[in-house]
Image (cartoon, helix red, strand yellow):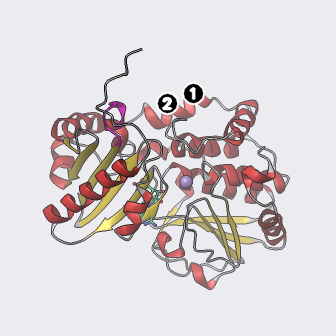
């Protein structure tokens, strides 16, 4: 486990342990359009709470992506825009602000906020905010341990899924020694980690593969090939046969090229437009997302969009190109120096 400096103060953690021990009925929620970390952290914590004899419901605005449906307990997640049951506390995971859940009624409960996003609004009665955690799943690992619940496969598998996905399959700069310490415990618990990865990354639809080809084919490059622009809409999903919930991670494709430093992906689906941003190294796309009313992390951020598409797209690409420019990294086009 990480040092105090790495993992933040332990005080919020012990307060949350106290609060959990003193209560019986919990509802867990996370952000709309949940990802591997939100689902993984929720499933692991819900299972741990049940192991303690408590009740735990998971209520999210949207269903888990297809790649996570096989995680233990995923079929028990309730999809709703409001919580109506009687609970002693609501535990909100992976949300920098409460409105990220898009679930009404959580605010009526004793709120526990557990998150790692820069700029967390500290909206809970108890707030545990640790931006040094690569994934909220790391924080839930520590919470489960502090509750004295053993790391059994139904807890370890979703935690591993959260860490695997939020580190971009162990590629992002958010990884620390703590990440590997926790994964070492996961492996020791008897989890087949390769099977978890295969379920997430090698069990997609044929439509996803066809969409991959179409996206790369239509990719546009800007700023001297350093910014890639991908666009997906309802027609493209229909033509390729890719389900809307099987697109996770496709945004990372252009980053495999050495020239590409950042990716803009525009998703115009079902009448709403969402923009996802990804970047390499020091390049800060979170600040770009914030300037468009969104948020996220330095290397992975997003926001919602309205307005005239072509004009706004140009502004987004311009802002991302400026972020690439502002980073300290050497220009991708430069030749290796002689000698
Ligand atoms: P994605 O591109 O996968 O939807 O999101 C990448 C990261 O940005 C995630 O950490 C996600 O929570 C964050 N993010 C995406 N959209 C928004 C948004 O509209 N508001 C905020 N605050 N964060 C967002
Ligand atoms: Mn996360």
Q: Nearer the viewer, residue 268 or 299?
A: 299
| Part of the protein shown in magenta | 255-261
Picture coordinates of residue 121, whole percent (x, y): 58, 74
Q: Quadrant of ligand 1?
A: bottom left
Residue 62 showing in the rendered view = no
Alpha carbon separation for disc pair 2 and 1: 6 Å
Label 2 residue SS: helix
Picture coordinates of residue 244, whole percent (x, y): 30, 51
Which residue is label 2 attached to? 198
Q: State which quarter of the image contains the N terminus.
A: top right
Residue 54 showing in the rendered view = yes
- Up the image or down, 20 lies above or below 163; here it is below
Q: Is residue 122 left or right of residue 244?
A: right
Q: Which mark is residue 194?
A: 1
Question: What is the magenta segment's predominant secondary structure?
Answer: loop
Give the quadrant of residue 116.
bottom right
Query: What is the total number of numbered labels drawn onto the structure image?
Result: 2
Residue at x-position 42% and y-position 14%: 339
Q: Residue furthest top?
A: 339
Are the residues at dot 2 and dot 1 in contact (C-beta closer than 8 Å)? yes
């Amino acid at each position: 486990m990480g040092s105090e400096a790495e993992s933040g103060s332990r005080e919020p953690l012990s307060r949350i342990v106290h609060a959990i021990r003193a209560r019986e009925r919990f509802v867990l929620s996370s952000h709309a359009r949940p990802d591997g970390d939100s689902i993984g952290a929720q499933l692991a914590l819900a299972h741990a709470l049940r192991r303690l004899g408590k009740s735990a419901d998971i209520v999210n605005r949207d269903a888990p992506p297809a790649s996570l449906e096989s995680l233990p307990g995923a079929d028990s997640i309730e999809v709703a825009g409001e919580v109506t049951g009687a609970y002693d506390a609501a535990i909100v995971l992976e949300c920098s602000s409460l409105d990220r859940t898009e679930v009404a009624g959580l605010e009526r409960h004793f709120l526990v906020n557990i998150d790692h996003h820069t700029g967390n609004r500290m909206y809970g009665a108890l707030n545990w905010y640790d931006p040094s955690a690569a994934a909220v799943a790391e924080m839930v690992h520590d919470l489960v341990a502090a509750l004295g619940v053993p790391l059994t496969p139904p807890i370890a598998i979703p935690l591993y899924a959260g860490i695997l996905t939020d580190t971009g399959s162990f590629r992002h700069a958010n990884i620390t020694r703590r990440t590997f310490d926790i994964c070492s415990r996961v492996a020791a618990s008897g989890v087949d980690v390769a099977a978890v990865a295969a379920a997430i990354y090698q069990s997609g639809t044929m439509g996803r593969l066809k969409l991959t080809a179409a996206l790369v084919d239509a990719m546009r490059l800007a700023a001297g090939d350093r910014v890639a622009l991908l666009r997906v809409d309802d027609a493209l999903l229909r033509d390729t046969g890719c389900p809307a919930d099987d697109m996770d991670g496709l945004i990372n494709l252009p980053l495999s090229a050495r020239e590409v430093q950042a990716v803009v992906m525009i998703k115009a689906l079902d009448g709403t437009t969402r923009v996802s941003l990804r970047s390499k190294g020091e390049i800060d796309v979170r600040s770009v997302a914030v300037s468009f009313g969104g948020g996220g992390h330095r290397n992975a951020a997003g926001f919602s969009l309205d307005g005239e598409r072509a004009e706004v797209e140009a502004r987004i690409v311009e802002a991302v190109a400026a972020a690439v420019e502002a980073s300290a990294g050497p220009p991708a086009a430069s030749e290796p120096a002689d000698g």
